[in-house]
Amino acid sequence: MTVDQTALDIVVALEARADPARAEREAAYLKSSLRHLGVRVPEIRSITRRTMREHAVTTRTEVVALAEELWAEPVHERRMAAVEALRFRVGTLTVDDLTAIERMLREAKTWALVDFLSSDIAGVIVVAYPDAGTILNRWAADDDFWIRRSALLSLLVPLRNGDGDWPRFSGYADAMLDEREFFIRKAIGWVLRDTAKKRPDLVEAWLRERPGRVPVLAVREAVKPLPERTRTELIAAALRR
C-alpha cells in the first residue's frame, strides 16, 4: 500500500466524521485560518493510528512522507493527523527530521499543533540525539515566538519525569523573562509547573532567585504544585514586579 493511499484513507475517514457546527466553534476558538472539519482529537488519533497499522506504515521514510502528505493541505484535522503520524512512530525519527518539523512549526501558528510537535516529537528526538541541542539553541533565539515556545516545550517531558536538561531550560527562560507574548509566558510557567511536581525545591529556588523578574502569569502556573504558603509568597513577590 502506498503512502498516498494511506493518506487518502485517513482523509476520507476524517471527512466522514465532519461536524460543521463543531468545526465553526473550533476555528473561532483557535482563531484559525485553516479549514476545519470538526473531528475530535481522540478520533483523529484513532483513525491515524488504525490506518497506519492497516497499511503497515512503519519505516522512517514512510512515516515522514505520510506526515508531509497530510500536512500539505491547509486543513486542521489533516495537520493534526500529520502530527499524530509522527507521534505514533516517533522512535523511527532522527535529528535530520527536525528540518521538516521546524517547517511545520513555522506554518502551524497555533498551540494546538505547535505543542505536540515540540513536546512529543522534537523533544523525543533531542533526548535521543543530544547534539540536537544546538538546534534548540537557535530556536530559542528565533524571531518567531512559536519557535521560541517550541524550544521551551521541547524540554518539557523529561523535566516532567524528574530528569531533563534543567540548565538549558533555565537559560532559555531567563532570556525570555521580559517578553510580553502570552504564549511564551505561559510556556515558561507550564514547564516550571510540571518540573515542580517532582522537584518542587528546584522550582521554588529558581523563582526566589529572580524576585520581581518572572511574569505573574508564569508564576501563577509554576507554583500550583507547591505548598499553599509558598504559593502565596511567590505570587505576592511577582505582583510587585
Image (tube, rainbow, N blue to C red):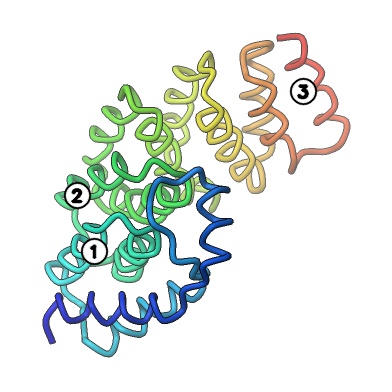
The residue under label 2 is 100
Q: Nearer the viewer, residue 232 or 50?
A: 50
Image quarter in which the N terminus is found: bottom left
Q: Amino acid at mark 1?
A: Ala
Image-based side of 29 in relation to 165, left or right:
right
Q: Residues within 10 Å of mark 3 (few under 14, many from 20)?
A: many
Q: Secondary structure at mark 1?
A: helix
Q: In 3D space, how far apart are the residues under numbered discs 3 and 2 (Cα atoms)?
A: 40 Å
Identify the residue shown where x is 28% and y is 37%: 133
Direction right: furthest residue = 229
Q: In the rendered image of this protein, does residue 184 appear above or below residue 53?
A: above
Q: Amino acid at mark 3?
A: Leu
Is there a contact, CB below 8 Å, between mark 3 and mark 2?
A: no
The residue under label 1 is 67
Q: In the rendered image of this protein, does residue 35 appear above or below residue 197?
A: below
Q: Earlier in the sequence, mark 2 or mark 1?
A: 1
